[in-house]
Amino acid sequence: MGAPEEEAPEGADIEEAPEETTVPDGFFKSVLVAASLGAGAIHIWAAWAHSTVPRVLIFFTVVATLQLWLAAAVVWVRSVPWSMLFGGAVVNAATVVVWVLSRTTGVPFQPESMQSMDAIMNRALSEPGVNTGAMAHEETFGLLDSAASALEVLVVVAVLVLWMKHRSQVATSEMDETVSQAVR
């Protein structure tokens, strides 16, 4: 049927289960999934709201798809590869950077900026303080876009915390193995 269990000799160290942390990995995985789902849902709405500008529609659709895909992978894949989690964190961090730039310097290559150079220069001369060139369309801060960016930051933080916890567990198990080999 099976091999009989061996009893540990007297005085031998029996490996104990690792102590539970105050916040289990399940919490950070849940934060990762919820934040990714929330940001993806907001980006689906943003794609619909910007459906008249094909480039922006495509951007929001791709970002929403990647965020929803990351959430689904974390929920349904037993052991998600770290490369996928890091890729998701990079996509979310890049989206936050685009959001910050679009609110501070303007959205690159919007239709308003695709005018002739004369029109851009006339606008710059007639309206002081207006961004010119490729960054002619500056967005305003809104509730939904700010919430999406906050959720994206949460995704990045959750991935980093999960990775640090994983590295800590790996280091602890390697140290335990080294100590047990030295004792033998």
Image: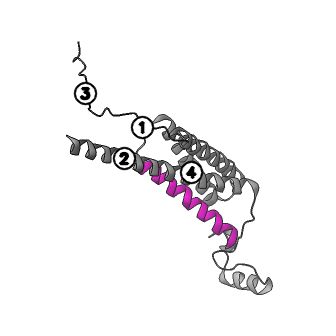
Of residues 26 and 114, the one nearer the viewer is 26
Q: Is residue 131 left or right of residue 88?
A: right
Q: Find disc 3 in the rendering and name its residue.
A: 10
**Residue type marked 2:** Thr
Real-space Cα separation, disc 2 to disc 4, in angstroms: 26 Å
Marks 2 and 4: CB-CB under 8 Å?
Answer: no
- The quadrant in which residue 110 appears is bottom right
Point out the image quarter for the C terminus.
Answer: top left
Determine crowd level at label 2: few under 14, some 14-19, many 20+ residues with C-alpha closer than 10 A. few
Residue drawn at x 40%, y 50% as measured from the top left? 167
List x then y, in percent, for residue 179. 27, 45
At x 42%, y 37%, the residue is: 18
Mark 2 or mark 4: whose residue is earlier in sequence: 4
| Quarter-of-image position of residue 120 | bottom right
Find the magenta span and give its range.
Answer: 83-104
Nearer the observer, 32 or 21: 21
Return the residue found at the far front: 11
Looking at the image, tell me whether mark 2 or mark 3 is earlier in sequence order: 3
The residue closer to the viewer here, 14 or 67, is 14
Residue type highlighted by circle 1: Pro
Using the image, determine if residue 61 lies above or below residue 33.
below
Residue where numbered disc 4 is placed: 155
Circle 4 sits in a helix, a strand or a loop, which is it? Answer: helix
How far apart are the two marked residues, 1 and 2, measured between alpha carbons? 10 Å
* Residue 137 vertical position relative to residue 54 in the rendered view, above or below: below
- Depth check, mark 1 against mark 4: the one in front is 1
Inter-mark Cα distance, 2 to 3: 25 Å
Mark number displayed over residue 18: 1
